[in-house]
Amino acid sequence: MREVLSGFTTWFKRPRNHSNARDDRRNKPDAGTWGLGMFGMMFRNPNKQSSGNKNKLVSGTITVNSPKGGENWIVGSTQTLMWTSDGVSGNVKIELSRDGGSTWNGIVESTPVAGNQTWNVVGPATTQAKIRVSAVSGNKVSGTSAANFTISSS
């Protein structure tokens, strides 16, 4: 998840005797004493916990392809979790939520970023299951099932 940092698009004080003050009065707040400057955008990775510079561009993506949402998986069945990744190296971890993504429990602590993992579905049943696949190290990129799926007992 990315968060845009504020402060890179900013209003700055201009002198009242600036040559374009008349034009500024029509378009800017406070009778032409302000100007707009665009300096660019920087993203902060809220998952990065180091005490170093947290203002780094997050790169890479993980997309969960199965389950996408709407599936009905039976407790005790074997299912294949599938994902694609771009710009992610190393290993990923896989987590399950039974409450629509509010809380997560580990299924696989570390597996190669290859793109699939078999899973023996376990209870309890829920209609609000989601899968999350996250990079174990590096930029902590993650992908989540697009919608809830069901885990049922029969």
Image (cartoon, helix red, strand yellow):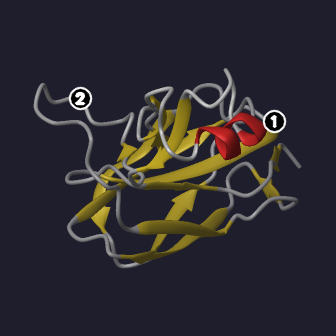
Q: Nearer the viewer, mark 1 or mark 2?
A: 2
Please state which of residues 137 and 42 is positioned toward the viewer in this rendering.
42
Q: Is residue 120 left or right of residue 51?
A: right
Query: Would residue 52 appear left or right of 90 to someone viewing this image?
Result: left
Seen in the picture, residue 84 relative to 33 is either above or below; the reply is below
Residue located 84% across and 62% down the image: 71
Please state which amino acid type lies under the numbered disc 1.
Answer: Thr
Q: Secondary structure at mark 2?
A: loop
Give left or right: position of 25 versus 35. Answer: right
- Looking at the image, which residue is at 45% across and 31% down? 14
Most extreme residue toward the left is 52
Q: Position of residue 132 (x, y in %)?
A: 54, 50
Residue 108: which disc? Answer: none
Lower position in the chain sequence, tag 1 or tag 2: 2
Residue drawn at (10%, 32%) of the image: 52
Q: Is residue 2 visible?
A: no
Q: Within 10 Å of the Cα at label 2, are there few (<14), some (14-19), or many (20+) other Cα atoms? A: few
Q: Residue furthest top?
A: 30
Report the residue marked by disc 2.
49
Q: Which residue is mark 1?
A: 126
Does residue 100 appear in this view? Answer: yes
At label 2, the amino acid type is Gln
Residue nearest the viewer, comparing 12 with 132: 12
